[in-house]
Amino acid sequence: MDILGLSTSPSSGGAYALILNEVEGNRRLPIIIGTFEAQAIALELESIKPPRPMTHDLLKNIILSFDSTVKEVYINDLNEGTFFAQILYEQNGEVIELDARPSDAIALAIRFGAQINVDSKVLNEAGIVSEEAGEEPAAEAGAPSAESKKEMSKLEKLEVELKTAIETENYEKAAKIRDQISKLKS
């Protein structure tokens, strides 16, 4: 994955959506993060060096002082709307894993030039197909049953709202709609 960008909306209460983009695919993964983490990521992406080290710069310096380096960030789980990540770093030839919030892990990954990977299960559950792909969901064979028509119409409405949210780059709203669609489908 690579970082497509950061998005915010006035109704977000200070939260941002960090948008990851599938390098060899057509899916995007919005992750809601806090203001400070968004700032740490944005400063590094824009190559802006503050006069004093930010928290993630300090962490990078500490890791380097122990002759270690971050090799990979792995977003490995999604549980009740919360993403989980692992930082894989190398010290003396040994790879060590640390549990981390994805926002902190990504802020470190970009400082080290490390890969950002997402478990396929997480991407399948929370990823949003990019509009550039031009793919339409496959139609199910057969007509829906009478009891599922109401459910289908609500699902179809949410899918239209999701498409609109993605087209207008309102990724925070898209993430919420994606979660509603997942609940309906399960």
Image (cartoon, rainbow, N blue to C red):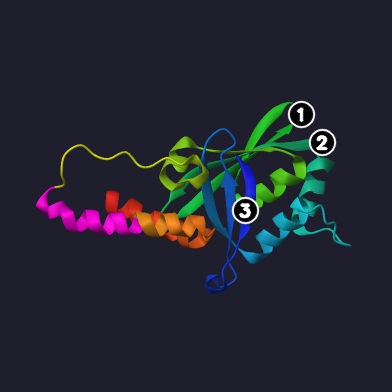
**Residue furthest out toward the top:** 93
Circle 3 sits in a helix, a strand or a loop, which is it?
A: helix
Circle 1 sits in a helix, a strand or a loop, which is it?
A: loop
Please tell me whether residue 37 is drawn above or below residue 144 in the rendered image: below
> Do the residues bearing badges 3 and 1 touch, measured as CB atoms within 8 Å?
no
Residue 122, horizontal then vertical, whole percent? 46, 42
Q: Which residue is mark 2?
A: 67
Residue 71 in magenta stretch: no
Residue 74, horizontal then vertical, whole percent? 58, 39
Q: Which residue is mark 1?
A: 92
Q: Which residue is mark 3?
A: 103
Q: Nearer the viewer, residue 62 or 9?
A: 9
Q: Residue at x 48, y 54 (%)?
A: 82
Q: Which residues are magenta?
A: 145-158
Q: Nearer the viewer, residue 74 or 21?
A: 21
The part of the image, by quadrant, that contains residue 6 is bottom right
Residue 153 in magenta stretch: yes
CA separation in Å, label 2 and label 1: 8 Å
